[in-house]
Image: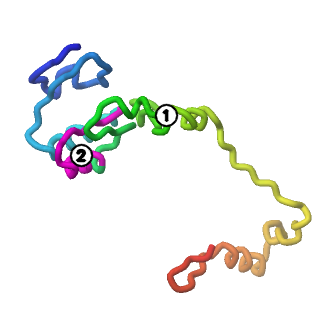
């Protein structure tokens, strides 16, 4: 393992995603500067926040976009098959582990099969078009509200 101290933001090690065993130590003045620094770059594969104060961990979770997140832990999330693991943006696409792997490498295809026996209902969709068909189409696609509910 290699620990790099007093690393500056412009140095090459801070310009790319780091895969161990290298740990660059970059100093910031507070949590807000940390969040701003992370959000100014590409979204990381994972974000880690360590603090005895759960508000700090939750703030990082809420404000930083990353493929995965660990609060007060490092690699455990990568070992749990019940938790999706993967990147976002340039750090990778897809989620892996258990069913998440199957879903990542599967194509979910939306399919619609319409029964021809109901074709008379669909006459409104076909020419010749007229004002009556237009009004029926508009009425069928409007959102209707009753009290606090929307009926589609």
Specify whether residue 55 is painted magenta: yes
Residue displayed at 60% across by 80% down = 144
Q: How many marks?
A: 2
Q: Quarter of the image containing the C terminus? A: bottom right
Provide the secondary structure element on which disc 1 rests: loop
Coloration mode: rainbow
Q: Is residue 75 above or below residue 3?
A: below
Residue displayed at 79% across by 67% down = 125
Residue 119, picture quadrant: bottom right
Q: Which residues are magenta?
A: 45-61
Observer-nearest of 43 and 3: 3
Q: Position of residue 102 (x, y in %)?
A: 60, 34
| The disc label shown at residue 57, or none | 2
Provide the secondary structure element on which disc 2 rests: helix
Residue at the outermost top position: 1
Observer-nearest of 39 and 57: 57
On the picture, is 54 further left or further right than 81?
Answer: left
Residue 122, picture quadrant: bottom right
Q: Earlier in the sequence, mark 2 or mark 1?
A: 2
Q: Is residue 127 above or below residue 44?
A: below
Disc 1 target residue: 81
Residue at the outermost right position: 117
Q: Position of residue 95 (x, y in %)?
A: 49, 35
Q: Is residue 147 above or below residue 70?
A: below
């Amino acid at each position: 393992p290699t620990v790099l101290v007093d690393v500056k933001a412009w140095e090459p090690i801070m310009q790319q995603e780091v895969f161990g065993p290298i740990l660059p130590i970059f100093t910031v003045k507070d949590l807000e500067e940390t969040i701003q620094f992370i959000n100014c770059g590409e979204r990381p594969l994972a974000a880690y926040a360590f603090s005895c104060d759960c508000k700090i961990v939750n703030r990082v979770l809420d404000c930083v976009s990353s493929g995965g997140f660990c609060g007060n832990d490092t690699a455990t999330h990568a070992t749990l098959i019940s938790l999706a693991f993967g990147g976002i943006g340039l750090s990778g696409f897809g989620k892996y582990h258990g069913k998440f792997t199957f879903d990542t490498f599967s194509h979910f295809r939306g399919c619609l099969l319409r029964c021809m026996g109901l074709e008379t209902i669909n006459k409104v969709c076909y020419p010749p078009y007229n004002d009556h068909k237009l009004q029926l189409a508009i009425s069928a696609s409007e959102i209707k509200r009753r009290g606090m509910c929307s009926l589609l």
